[in-house]
Image (cartoon, grey):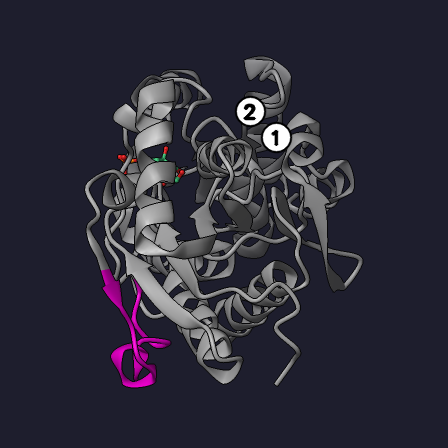
Amino acid sequence: MMENTKKLRRIGVLTSGGDAPGMNAAIRAVVRTCIGNGIIPVGIRRGYNGLINSDVQILDARAVNGITSRGGTMLYTARCDEFRTPQGVERAAQNCRYLGIDGIVCIGGDGTFRGARELAHAGVATVGIPGTIDNDIACTHYSIGFDTAANTAIEAIDRLADTMQSHERTSVVEVMGHNAGHLALYVGLAVGAAVIITPEKPCDFENDVLERLRESHYNGRHHFIVIVAEGSGNTQQIAQRIKEETGQETRVTTLGHVQRGGSPTARDRTMASRMGHYAVEQLMAGKSNIVVCYRNSQLMDLPIDEALEMQRGLDEYMYQVARDISI
Ligand code: F6P
């Protein structure tokens, strides 16, 4: 037990934006760290909507029993338009004061952190935890859900590769990423994709696609995996063009929301548990308006303003490795 220096009565926890496997483990960690420190944990349902509508519930240790292995979020998640207005934020802050919620752990992506910043400005202490399969939050090298989503995609693509090999076809696979190519690159490297197309890198079709397929062909390959990150262009059109220019039969698979579900991997479970615990400790130490980050193999925190200003480019080295060894 750590000294509750800030004398917090209740700490709320919410999940907002797209769900991500591992969010439940983070909720569990928040709840149990609170209880261990004499703080009452409050579950806030449906993201910031729950704060505006007072859709809240006290959670005891048993309420979060067995949820670590489950994907999704037991608190539900949503995007909340009303919370984007000053009136919505004030209403939420007023409800927190009335309900005696002194701090909130907000799990989600950049949009969630913007909400947490507004709440902090309105007088409610907040800590953000990165949770998105996109892994596109610049301040942290790791976001909850990324590892599970990547492994889900890899398993699916390995299956596709079997049938592509049998028919000597090209599989054009669209992975999620909301205009970010981190998941596509990671997955592409792991499955040995011949081509990886991401929104961050302009794609010169002749050099980046056709020449790579040609080179692989000369190396004796007759089936190919092409990974397209969501937001990099029209996947159907990319497949059609490959078919027209190479004569190869192509098949398109959009992995979609399959990547967002499923039982979290060990990495997501443990990272989420650590981040949830750490977030409560920071609130107890009197901190607010911060995001929990995983950098250089350790947890730390950064002011939300600073975190939101950071830019995250694609990992150039990983991109180069993927290109170099997929011949
Ligand atoms: O941010 C996570 C994410 O899965 C993105 O990769 C994707 O673009 C988006 O959410 C899909 O959102 P929704 O579930 O609202 O369709």
Q: Nearer the viewer, residue 266 or 124?
A: 124
Residue 106: x %, y % from top left: 45, 49
Q: Is residue 61 one of those drawn in magenta?
A: yes
Q: Residues within 10 Å of mark 1 (few under 14, many from 20)?
A: some
Q: Residue at x 47, y 26 (%)?
A: 179
Range shown magenta: 57-71
Locate residue 264, reporting x and y percent.
40, 69
76 left or right, relative to 34 = left
Q: Position of residue 268 (x, y in %)?
A: 50, 67
Identify the residue at image location x=44%, y=80%.
Answer: 35
- Point out the image quarter for the N terminus: bottom right
**Is 284 above or below relative to 106?**
below
In the image, what residue type sits under mark 1? Arg
Asked where in the image residue 17 lies, by quadrant, the reply is: top left
The residue to which callout 2 is attached is 209
Q: Quadrant of the C terminus?
A: top right
Q: Is residue 231 left or right of residue 82?
A: right
The correct choice, above or below, for 119 with respect to 294 in the image is above
User: What is the number of callouts on the image?
Assistant: 2
Magenta region, main secondary structure: loop
Query: In the displayed structure, would residue 253 be above or below residue 278?
Result: above
- Asked whether 134 or 308 is in front, the reply is 308
Q: Which residue is mark 1?
A: 212
What residue is at 35 percent from the left and 44 percent from the top?
16
The answer to whether mark 2 and mark 1 are in CB contact below 8 A is yes
Q: Could you tell me if residue 314 is visible in this image? A: yes
Quadrant field for ligand 1: top left
Q: Secondary structure at mark 1?
A: helix
Q: Is disc 2 placed on a helix, strand or loop? A: helix
